[in-house]
Image: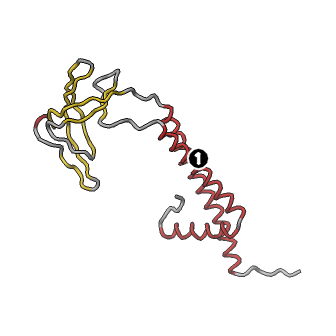
Amino acid sequence: MSSEKPSLGEEIYSDASSFGKIWSLIGAVIGTIIGLGLFIFGLVFFFRKKTNRDEVLASVSSINGGGTERCEKISDNPVNYSCLLTFNYNYKGNAYNLDYNYNGANIYYKGQKTNIYVNVNHPTDILLGKEAPSWTGLIFAIVGIIIIAGGWFWYWMSRRYKFLAAAQGVGGAYNIISGRSGFI
Protein backbone atom coordinates (compact mmCIF):
# COMPACT_ATOMS: atom_id res chain seq x y z
CA MET A 1 0.00 0.00 0.00
CA SER A 2 1.33 3.32 -0.97
CA SER A 3 0.33 6.40 0.86
CA GLU A 4 0.87 8.87 -1.89
CA LYS A 5 0.20 12.44 -1.04
CA PRO A 6 -2.15 14.07 -3.54
CA SER A 7 -0.54 16.55 -5.86
CA LEU A 8 -1.05 20.27 -5.47
CA GLY A 9 -3.35 20.30 -8.52
CA GLU A 10 -5.53 17.54 -7.06
CA GLU A 11 -5.78 19.37 -3.73
CA ILE A 12 -6.77 22.61 -5.44
CA TYR A 13 -9.31 20.75 -7.57
CA SER A 14 -10.85 19.06 -4.49
CA ASP A 15 -10.91 22.27 -2.49
CA ALA A 16 -12.46 24.20 -5.38
CA SER A 17 -15.05 21.45 -5.73
CA SER A 18 -15.88 21.57 -2.00
CA PHE A 19 -16.18 25.35 -2.09
CA GLY A 20 -18.31 25.13 -5.24
CA LYS A 21 -20.78 22.83 -3.49
CA ILE A 22 -21.11 25.29 -0.62
CA TRP A 23 -21.35 28.24 -3.03
CA SER A 24 -24.11 26.55 -5.04
CA LEU A 25 -25.98 25.71 -1.81
CA ILE A 26 -25.84 29.37 -0.77
CA GLY A 27 -27.08 30.34 -4.24
CA ALA A 28 -29.94 27.82 -4.01
CA VAL A 29 -31.00 29.17 -0.61
CA ILE A 30 -30.89 32.80 -1.80
CA GLY A 31 -32.72 31.82 -4.98
CA THR A 32 -35.37 30.07 -2.89
CA ILE A 33 -35.92 33.18 -0.79
CA ILE A 34 -36.20 35.40 -3.89
CA GLY A 35 -38.32 32.82 -5.72
CA LEU A 36 -40.72 32.46 -2.79
CA GLY A 37 -41.08 36.24 -2.64
CA LEU A 38 -41.91 36.40 -6.34
CA PHE A 39 -44.26 33.42 -6.06
CA ILE A 40 -46.19 34.89 -3.11
CA PHE A 41 -46.32 38.36 -4.70
CA GLY A 42 -47.56 36.81 -7.94
CA LEU A 43 -50.33 34.85 -6.26
CA VAL A 44 -51.46 37.84 -4.19
CA PHE A 45 -51.48 40.00 -7.33
CA PHE A 46 -53.37 37.32 -9.30
CA PHE A 47 -56.08 36.81 -6.67
CA ARG A 48 -56.46 40.47 -5.67
CA LYS A 49 -59.86 42.03 -5.98
CA LYS A 50 -59.70 44.13 -9.10
CA THR A 51 -61.31 47.54 -8.88
CA ASN A 52 -64.08 48.09 -11.39
CA ARG A 53 -63.24 51.27 -13.31
CA ASP A 54 -64.82 53.27 -16.12
CA GLU A 55 -62.86 55.24 -18.69
CA VAL A 56 -63.80 58.93 -18.64
CA LEU A 57 -62.58 61.92 -20.66
CA ALA A 58 -61.20 64.62 -18.34
CA SER A 59 -59.70 68.04 -18.84
CA VAL A 60 -56.64 69.41 -17.03
CA SER A 61 -58.05 72.65 -15.61
CA SER A 62 -54.92 73.76 -13.73
CA ILE A 63 -51.39 72.68 -12.92
CA ASN A 64 -49.82 73.38 -9.52
CA GLY A 65 -52.86 75.40 -8.51
CA GLY A 66 -52.78 77.55 -11.64
CA GLY A 67 -49.21 78.75 -11.27
CA THR A 68 -47.81 77.02 -14.35
CA GLU A 69 -48.90 75.97 -17.82
CA ARG A 70 -47.26 72.52 -17.81
CA CYS A 71 -45.66 69.96 -15.51
CA GLU A 72 -42.09 70.55 -14.37
CA LYS A 73 -39.33 68.16 -15.47
CA ILE A 74 -37.59 66.75 -12.39
CA SER A 75 -35.12 64.37 -14.06
CA ASP A 76 -33.64 63.69 -17.49
CA ASN A 77 -32.60 60.04 -17.27
CA PRO A 78 -35.23 58.71 -17.17
CA VAL A 79 -37.39 61.68 -18.11
CA ASN A 80 -39.75 62.34 -15.22
CA TYR A 81 -42.28 65.10 -14.56
CA SER A 82 -43.97 66.13 -11.34
CA CYS A 83 -46.91 68.41 -10.64
CA LEU A 84 -50.30 68.81 -9.01
CA LEU A 85 -52.92 68.29 -11.70
CA THR A 86 -56.50 69.42 -11.32
CA PHE A 87 -58.91 67.38 -13.43
CA ASN A 88 -62.46 68.36 -14.40
CA TYR A 89 -64.71 65.49 -15.44
CA ASN A 90 -68.32 64.38 -15.41
CA TYR A 91 -69.27 60.93 -14.18
CA LYS A 92 -72.83 59.58 -13.92
CA GLY A 93 -74.32 63.07 -14.13
CA ASN A 94 -72.05 64.61 -11.47
CA ALA A 95 -69.26 67.11 -12.11
CA TYR A 96 -65.92 66.57 -10.35
CA ASN A 97 -62.97 68.88 -9.86
CA LEU A 98 -60.18 66.72 -8.43
CA ASP A 99 -56.53 67.38 -7.51
CA TYR A 100 -54.10 64.61 -8.40
CA ASN A 101 -50.42 64.46 -7.42
CA TYR A 102 -48.67 63.33 -10.58
CA ASN A 103 -45.17 61.93 -10.95
CA GLY A 104 -44.40 60.17 -14.22
CA ALA A 105 -43.00 60.19 -17.74
CA ASN A 106 -45.95 61.90 -19.49
CA ILE A 107 -46.14 65.66 -19.70
CA TYR A 108 -49.46 67.39 -19.05
CA TYR A 109 -50.53 70.86 -20.18
CA LYS A 110 -53.29 73.15 -18.95
CA GLY A 111 -56.40 72.54 -21.07
CA GLN A 112 -55.27 69.09 -22.23
CA LYS A 113 -57.92 66.40 -22.63
CA THR A 114 -56.98 62.93 -21.39
CA ASN A 115 -58.63 59.67 -20.45
CA ILE A 116 -58.74 58.77 -16.77
CA TYR A 117 -60.05 55.64 -15.08
CA VAL A 118 -62.67 56.26 -12.39
CA ASN A 119 -63.53 53.79 -9.63
CA VAL A 120 -67.25 53.07 -10.14
CA ASN A 121 -67.87 52.94 -6.37
CA HIS A 122 -65.71 55.99 -5.47
CA PRO A 123 -65.69 58.49 -8.36
CA THR A 124 -62.91 60.55 -6.75
CA ASP A 125 -60.55 57.54 -6.89
CA ILE A 126 -58.89 57.84 -10.31
CA LEU A 127 -55.98 56.37 -12.21
CA LEU A 128 -54.25 57.84 -15.25
CA GLY A 129 -53.65 54.40 -16.77
CA LYS A 130 -55.31 51.01 -16.78
CA GLU A 131 -54.58 48.58 -13.96
CA ALA A 132 -52.24 45.73 -14.81
CA PRO A 133 -54.15 42.56 -15.75
CA SER A 134 -54.38 39.78 -13.16
CA TRP A 135 -52.52 37.28 -15.34
CA THR A 136 -49.28 39.24 -14.83
CA GLY A 137 -49.33 37.84 -11.29
CA LEU A 138 -49.10 34.35 -12.75
CA ILE A 139 -45.95 35.37 -14.63
CA PHE A 140 -44.33 36.45 -11.35
CA ALA A 141 -45.38 33.18 -9.69
CA ILE A 142 -43.99 31.08 -12.56
CA VAL A 143 -40.70 33.02 -12.59
CA GLY A 144 -40.46 32.40 -8.84
CA ILE A 145 -40.91 28.66 -9.35
CA ILE A 146 -38.31 28.63 -12.14
CA ILE A 147 -35.78 30.45 -9.93
CA ILE A 148 -36.32 27.98 -7.08
CA ALA A 149 -36.14 24.94 -9.36
CA GLY A 150 -33.10 26.30 -11.20
CA GLY A 151 -31.20 27.01 -7.99
CA TRP A 152 -31.80 23.55 -6.55
CA PHE A 153 -31.13 21.88 -9.89
CA TRP A 154 -27.77 23.67 -10.06
CA TYR A 155 -27.01 22.57 -6.49
CA TRP A 156 -27.87 18.96 -7.39
CA MET A 157 -25.65 19.15 -10.48
CA SER A 158 -22.73 20.50 -8.44
CA ARG A 159 -23.14 17.62 -5.96
CA ARG A 160 -23.28 15.09 -8.79
CA TYR A 161 -20.42 16.35 -10.98
CA LYS A 162 -17.16 17.30 -9.31
CA PHE A 163 -15.88 19.26 -12.30
CA LEU A 164 -19.01 21.43 -12.25
CA ALA A 165 -18.62 22.03 -8.51
CA ALA A 166 -14.95 22.96 -9.06
CA ALA A 167 -15.90 25.41 -11.80
CA GLN A 168 -18.58 26.85 -9.53
CA GLY A 169 -16.01 27.15 -6.74
CA VAL A 170 -13.50 28.96 -8.96
CA GLY A 171 -16.24 31.30 -10.20
CA GLY A 172 -17.45 31.92 -6.65
CA ALA A 173 -13.92 32.66 -5.42
CA TYR A 174 -13.37 35.04 -8.33
CA ASN A 175 -16.64 36.84 -7.55
CA ILE A 176 -15.66 37.22 -3.89
CA ILE A 177 -12.21 38.52 -4.75
CA SER A 178 -13.56 40.94 -7.38
CA GLY A 179 -16.34 42.19 -5.09
CA ARG A 180 -19.31 40.75 -6.99
CA SER A 181 -22.01 38.65 -5.34
CA GLY A 182 -22.16 36.08 -8.14
CA PHE A 183 -25.38 34.39 -7.04
CA ILE A 184 -27.71 36.00 -9.50
Residue 81 image offset from top left, x and y in percent: 23, 46
Residue 62 image offset from top left, x and y in percent: 14, 34
Residue placed at 58% from the left, 57% from the top? 27
Q: Quadrant of residue 103?
A: top left
Q: Quadrant of residue 10?
A: bottom right
In the image, 110: left or right of 15?
Answer: left
Which quadrant would the N terminus be assigned to in this image? bottom right
Q: Residue furthest left?
A: 67
Tag 1 secondary structure: helix
Residue 6 image offset from top left, x and y in percent: 75, 79
> Which residue type carries mark 1?
Ile
User: What residue did someone put label 1 on?
Assistant: 145
In the image, 161: left or right of 114?
Answer: right
Q: Of residues 11 and 149, which is closer to you in this image?
A: 149
Q: Of residues 168 and 176, which is closer to you in this image?
A: 168
Residue 64 visible here: no
Looking at the image, what colour scheme do you see?
Answer: secondary structure
